Image (spheres, coloured by chain):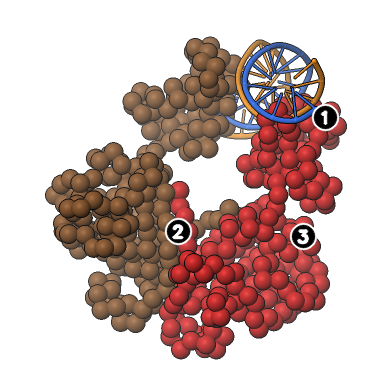
Chain colours: A brown, B red, C orange, D blue
Amino acid sequence: MKHIRQQPLYTQVKKELMQRIADKTWLPGQMIPNETQLAEEFGVSQGTVRRALDDMMEDRLIFRKQGVGTFIAEETVSSALKSFFKIKMDDQSKRNYPTNENINITIAKPSEEEISLLQLAHGDKVTRIFRVRSLEGIKSVYEKISLPTNLFPSIETIDPLPDALYPLFQAKYQIRIGTANDVIKAISADSECSAELHVPKSQPILYVNRLSYSIQNRPIEIRKSYCNTTSSHYHIVLS
Amino acid sequence: MKHIRQQPLYTQVKKELMQRIADKTWLPGQMIPNETQLAEEFGVSQGTVRRALDDMMEDRLIFRKQGVGTFIAEETVSSALKSFFKIKMDDQSKRNYPTNENINITIAKPSEEEISLLQLAHGDKVTRIFRVRSLEGIKSVYEKISLPTNLFPSIETIDPLPDALYPLFQAKYQIRIGTANDVIKAISADSECSAELHVPKSQPILYVNRLSYSIQNRPIEIRKSYCNTTSSHYHIVLS
DNA sequence: TAGTGGTCTAGACCACATT
DNA sequence: ATGTGGTCTAGACCACTAC
């Protein structure tokens, strides 16, 4: 390994290893060479490789089994999903990811709120996605999503629209969500919610108003979620 | 350092160092001995001390300045509060921290849930704190808090009980909250909530069920918060 | 210049899982 | 028995900060 003294050796090793994941040299689930072999290949010590692997483990890019080996993490996209998908069934044994229903996509002139939050320029359009998401057969979330149309060309023609949007954003539009702001309230179901979620009017609804940003910190998505939390909840770990 | 082979040396070193922070041997902002000195004192290698310090840095218990030294982190009220106090006014310009009202503290035999979640031993008691918190004069949150009585002796005699409990936990009981799990639902106000928060029955209420852990990962607190989110909200940043 | 944290090495041994 | 990751050591040198 060339000694660029600008950055530590373990960072350089990590970058090379990440490259191999990115270019599919190593596929998800696959076991990679052991630490000694990698150390020899890169011309560094085993400790340096270990430091690189420790960092990658922290990023959940790999996982290790003592006595077995080091493996590429499955679907590095969906692991990012874990960070942003917060609605869980109360019964943790049922860990179904929600399915889409009643999808409706329109392109429209943006509202004041959309212009402001998504930082739209004059004349920019907005693509709105309406959908109901079901968990274990129960209509749990009614979502209204607003996206800048120019960032997501032809997204309205994708059929079927995948249940998880963030992997789609990344795979098809090279947009990776980095952070999100969730503002959460308890409200009463209005007639729209009531109809979409099949709940009585005035049922308590968990309202999550999200603004998502790309890793470059550009606002990407407004997502208003109306959740029937009768048998599910919003779960967050603070530290 | 005694070689308990049950756990790695670096975790034992870490525990001893954390103890010195807890018992005020080392105070916030103070510089601690360098890695070599600590290694000599504990009878381990410098690399082992470093691993312990790396872990503590991850937990933000210490910080380092290259070329200067290693310092105990300033445990500011605001830093702990920022992480764990999530209810904000909708109008961000008003950033009042809530005040206590109607405080009621009792010591009781724990419920099944309390025994299980707080990992109580046979005969352990539980201290329950009930209080209403107001934001800008509006009764916003009704809280029921459960604590292991043996960890918080005489907390029921503290008068007035401070608005923020976590700084008290640390200052008086050397217990620092490190993580918390929040489970959030929207429910209807029951008669108890209705009375405490002065809202009509069946008003939508944001119910936050929290289980907090110390930095040593021991469960410390169950906190059930019932929030009137008419003019406030729960705010979380995901990444 | 002296003292600190940051990186790196080469080698040893332990704990765990598979064969 | 073998091979893997996990821990630990002793020592070296680099990079940064203060004096």
From this view, report whether residue B45 is shown above or below residue A2: below
Q: Where is mark 2, residue-wise?
A: A93
From where the camera sits, is residue B181 visible?
yes
Residue B198's spot in the image, x, y percent? Answer: 52, 87
Residue B184's spot in the image, x, y percent? Answer: 48, 67
Find residue B171 and name its label: 3
Specify the amino acid type for callout 3. Ala
Q: Residue at (81%, 34%) from the top-left corner? A: B33
Chain to which mark 3 belongs: B
Chain to which mark 2 belongs: A
Please give left or right for residue B126 compared with residue B82 in the image.
Answer: right
SS for callout 2: loop
Specify the amino acid type for callout 2. Ser
Q: Earlier in the sequence, mark 3 or mark 1?
A: 1
Chain to which mark 1 belongs: B
SS for callout 3: helix
Mark 3 or 2: in front is 3
Residue A56's spot in the image, x, y percent? Answer: 50, 32
Give the CA separation, mark 3 to mark 2.
39 Å
Q: Residue at (55%, 89%) from the top-left corner? A: B195
Residues B2 and B133: in front is B133
Dot 3: within a 10 Å radius of its alpha carbon, few (fewer than 14), some, or many (20 or more) residues? Answer: some
Please give left or right for residue B72 compared with residue B139 in the image.
Answer: right
Q: Residue at (68%, 34%) from the top-left corner? A: B65
Find residue B37 and name its label: 1
